[in-house]
């Protein structure tokens, strides 16, 4: 398996969205290391830098619907794997405004 380089991004104090991360090429998954507590975390993807970012949803015909890639409320720092379907540009989104700047590390895989 090919892994991308670790990238750092920050969700600023009082904000919910990280800066854009360029994974360097298209990947099917992202591993994110998150220090965020008391929030959920989701991922949005874009096909171009500076483009429109879309929330990732997975269609599951057996469960009759599509489901957002959202974590449960994080009560401890966590390593999270998100399926991103071959995207290069991502943003990480907290479920609410964070308290203090939160730096997350992520890499494509």
Image (tube, helix red, strand yellow):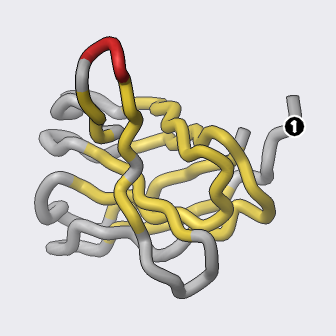
Look at the numbered disc 1 and give the secondary structure of its residue.
Answer: loop
Quadrant of the drawing holding the N terminus: top right
Name the one closer to the observer, 26 or 61. Answer: 61
Determine the residue located farthest toward the right in the rendered image: 2
Residue appearing at x 21%, y 73% in the figure:
15
Q: Residue at x 31, y 59 (%)?
A: 93
Q: Left or right of 29: which side holds 36? A: left
Quadrant of the rendering where the C terminus is positioned = top right
Residue 18 picture location, percent across and down: 39, 69
Is 64 above or below relative to 21?
above
Q: Vertical placement of 27 versus 48: above or below?
A: above
Please tell me in which quadrant of the rendered image residue 40 appears.
top left
* 58 vs 104: above or below: above
Residue at position x 59%, y 50% in the image? 106
The residue indicated by pointer 1 is 2
Q: Quadrant for residue 58, please give it.
A: top left
Specify few, some or many for label 1: CA neighbours under 10 Å numbering under 14, 14-19, or 20 or more: few
Between 24 and 103, the one lying in front of the other is: 24
């Amino acid at each position: 398996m090919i892994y991308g380089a670790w990238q750092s991004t920050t969700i600023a104090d009082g904000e919910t969205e990280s800066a854009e991360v360029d994974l360097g090429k298209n990947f099917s998954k992202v591993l994110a290391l998150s220090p965020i507590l008391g929030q959920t975390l989701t991922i949005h993807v874009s096909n171009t830098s500076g483009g429109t970012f879309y929330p990732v949803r997975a269609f599951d015909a057996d469960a009759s619907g599509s489901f957002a890639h959202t974590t449960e409320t994080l009560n401890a720092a966590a390593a999270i794997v998100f399926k991103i379907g071959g995207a290069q540009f991502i943003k990480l989104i907290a479920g609410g405004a964070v308290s203090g700047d939160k730096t997350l590390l992520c890499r494509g895989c």
